Image (tube, grey):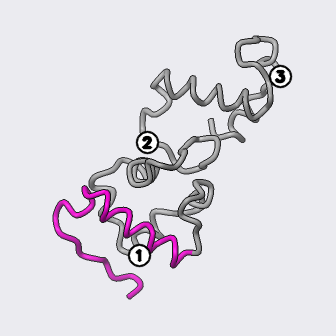
Amino acid sequence: ASGRLLRVAQGFWKSPANRRQFLLDFALKEDIKWNEPMDWSGVTIKQLRARGGGSLFVYFNSFWDVLRTTFPELHWSPLSTKVRLPPGYWEDKAHQRQFCDGVAQKLSFDPSYSAHWKAVTADKFIELGG
């Protein structure tokens, strides 16, 4: 029932199969296309808790980590998924580079040409998930 917490065995969420089944059921109930990363953008922790997934965050720092490890076959990018990223995500130079390459691709320019970057505003970076 709504508001009642789902009790799961210790270690239950460590299993990718258990997480996958929970998220597939969640997606069905919430009318989310599970294989469309952008569809997960509006999901809140409150919704996950209401459906019994609150204890997921004992094992994961963010919903981004839950999704990325549960559905590794999908392309999880801050450009295509406005899900809150784990702490420290942007400190990794590889993540910064991947994001900038994605911005350049989305805006249809060569990332190695510095003049193109001068036209990209801070607001545009934020809009694209950075």
Disc 1 crowd, CA 10 A, few/some/many (<14, 14-19, 20+):
many
- SS at badge 2: loop
- In which quadrant of the rendered image does the C terminus lie? top right
Q: Is residue 129 left or right of residue 6?
A: right
Q: Is residue 43 above or below residue 29?
A: above
* 11 in magenta: yes
x 64%, y 41%: residue:
79
What is the three-letter code of the residue carrying label 2? Pro
Verify CB contact (< 8 Å) between mark 2 and mark 1. Answer: no
Residue that numbered label 2 is attached to? 86
Q: Is residue 20 above or below residue 119?
A: below
Q: Give 6 or 71, whichever is nearer the viewer.
A: 71
What is the three-letter code of the residue carrying label 3? Ala
x then y, percent, for residue 13: 27, 60
Disc 2 crowd, CA 10 A, few/some/many (<14, 14-19, 20+):
few
- SS at badge 3: loop
Task: Write down the region rendered in magenta.
Answer: 1-30
Label for residue 51? 1
Label for residue 119? 3
Label whose residue precedes the other's in the sequence (2 or 3)? 2
